[in-house]
Amino acid sequence: MIIKRLFSSSFRTQLMINNQWVNSSSGKTFKTINPSTEEVITEVQYGTPADINKAVDAARKAFDGPWRQVTAVQRSELLYKLADLIEKNKEELAQMETLDNGKPITDSREVDLPSVISVYKYYAGFTDKIFGKTIPMNGPFFTYTRLEPKGVVGQIIPWNFPLLMQAWKLAPALAAGCTIVLKPAEQTPLTSLRVGELIIEAGFPPGVVNIVPGYGNTGASLAVHPKVDKIAFTGSTEVGMEIIRNSGIHGLRRVSLELGGKSPNIILDDADLELAVSQSHNGIFFNQGQNCDAGSRLFVQEGIYNDFISRAVQCAKDRKLGDPFDPTTIQGPQVDENQMMKILNYIDIGKKEGAKILTGGKRWGKKGYFVEPTIFTDVTDNMTIAKEEIFGPVLSVLKFKTIDEVIERANNSNYGLSAGVVTNDMEKALKIVNGLRTGTVCVNCYAVTTEGTPFGGYKQSGVGRELGEDGIMNYLETKTVVVKASTDTLP
Ligand code: NAI
Ligand code: MG
């Protein structure tokens, strides 16, 4: 089936500062690559510290000026307008996402774009529901709190869900009344720039959203900028820790982080076998395994183990890899050569440390950064592939006997992002749910996250929560107002 391409070479490739499209101050550009063909799509302007400076100044001016005069209802209208424009252009955006990231077009169309639109609409509806409290004081005072926008926010996003991560960051920050400098990932800048065009078209005033593409050094200069009040980051734990360490340089910035994971997924003996196979398959292989909440440590109870493994291997073998623009493709390429090499290296380490490959284990094809869906068994807790985030289509299967044992082993990780349990016994499920130290636990499903559900991690998986009410609180400061009252106004 041939898809009519909705874009030609008319990509936005410049920086968006103050609602203007400008070149990098250095004149430097970087290539963005189609990961399924390894061909260059286009060259994008490479933001420098001087460009970040300009963008932050624009955001500061907008925050201290016109944006503070915009009412909650007007912010809501702007966000709904943006959601409508994304909806109107969703097929083009889905195709552009698939081109730049490599994810199958069916996922872009049916998962990413609908979720993006829902997130903008959810926060469009939140702007006038940001409530303070009235507080009883022991004395003649009228005391209340106001929730106010944090100010200028720097947002640094990854490449695994470019449009969706942009929505998770922009929507709550705009709803709260902040202004923003956003740095998209170097692998996938195209869709965020296209959304930039739609932001201008929706009528957001100049400086409210600024988009500066570039590499890690562009992000690093944003993360230490003295006029930035808050940094929101999604990406590797390593960079997240650097951002925390640097948050006190040139002032003090608030920080929220959504980082890596090595999430346990637990299949009990009494589980519905078919459900367990499909839940764990999608839990690891969806989006080429490039999910912070991937169920990459699969604990299977000994009674169901043999039946489960043979079905799970068959399911992985049946997974259809190929051209991501083919609507029947289920798995596309990894985002770039670095990620592919990282995954293949972990597969090597797994073999050397004594784990057994039941299917996959190699690069797929000669062109494009494809990796076969891979299942390792005989994995023990201390192996590298059971401890470190692989961020690819590689499943480590571990066997267990008792519930207490699996809770302890599942928690024995530096990470604590997500988890899953498959069972028909709700008492056992709840014992596991309450025992796990992770930000999310899904029972008889996996990684179900929608705009209203808080998302984030314990331990080294992050700081703070995105989405839902928690997501908007990330961008608000509490102001306490104490008004001296005369005693006769009191009850
Ligand atoms: P990364 O953390 O280096 O990149 C994420 C974003 O941070 C990109 O926009 C990047 O340009 C920016 N960045 C890089 N260095 C920075 C710095 N020093 N200061 C500020 N911003 C910086 O992640 P990368 O290299 O793309 O992937 C490495 C691993 O990180 C992956 O294999 C995966 O394990 C993990 N990862 C986790 C993600 C998640 O959703 N939690 C998303 C992407 C990667
Ligand atoms: Mg990196």
Image: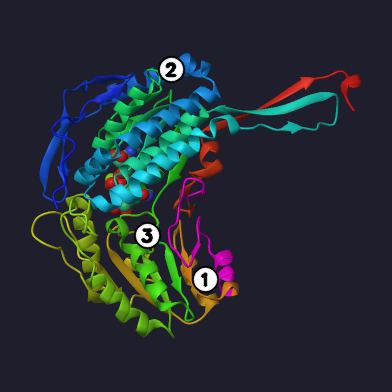
Q: Which quadrant of the frame does ligand 2 lie within?
A: top left
In the image, the segment drawn in magenta is 428-456
- Ligand 1 has an atom within 8 Å of the beta carbon of the residue at disc 1: no
Residue depicted at 16% across the width and 27% down the height: 28
By secondary structure, the bulk of the magenta-drawn segment is best described as: loop
Question: With 471 as the anchor, is 212 left or right in this view?
Answer: left
Foreground pick, 367 / 197: 197
Q: Is residue 446 shown to the viewer in this render?
A: yes
Mark before the other along the chain sequence, 3 or 1 = 3
Residue depicted at 66% across the width and 31% down the height: 132
Q: Which residue is mark 1?
A: 407
Residue depicted at 30% across the width and 47% down the height: 109
Residue depicted at 34% across the width and 59% down the height: 389
**Above or below: residue 230 compared with residue 313:** above
Mark before the other along the chain sequence, 2 or 3 = 2
Question: With 271 as the anchor, is 479 left or right in this view?
Answer: right
Disc 2 marks a residue whose amino acid type is Ala
Which image quarter holds the C terminus? Answer: top right
Q: Which residue is mark 2?
A: 62
Q: Which residue is mark 3?
A: 294
For numbered disc 2, what is the local secondary structure? helix
Q: CA distance from mark 3 to mark 1?
A: 18 Å
Give percent across and percent down for residue 13: 20, 29
Foreground pick, 360 / 124: 124
| Dots 1, 2 in contact, CB < 8 A | no
Mark before the other along the chain sequence, 1 or 2 = 2
Disc 3 marks a residue whose amino acid type is Ala
Foreground pick, 42 / 382: 42
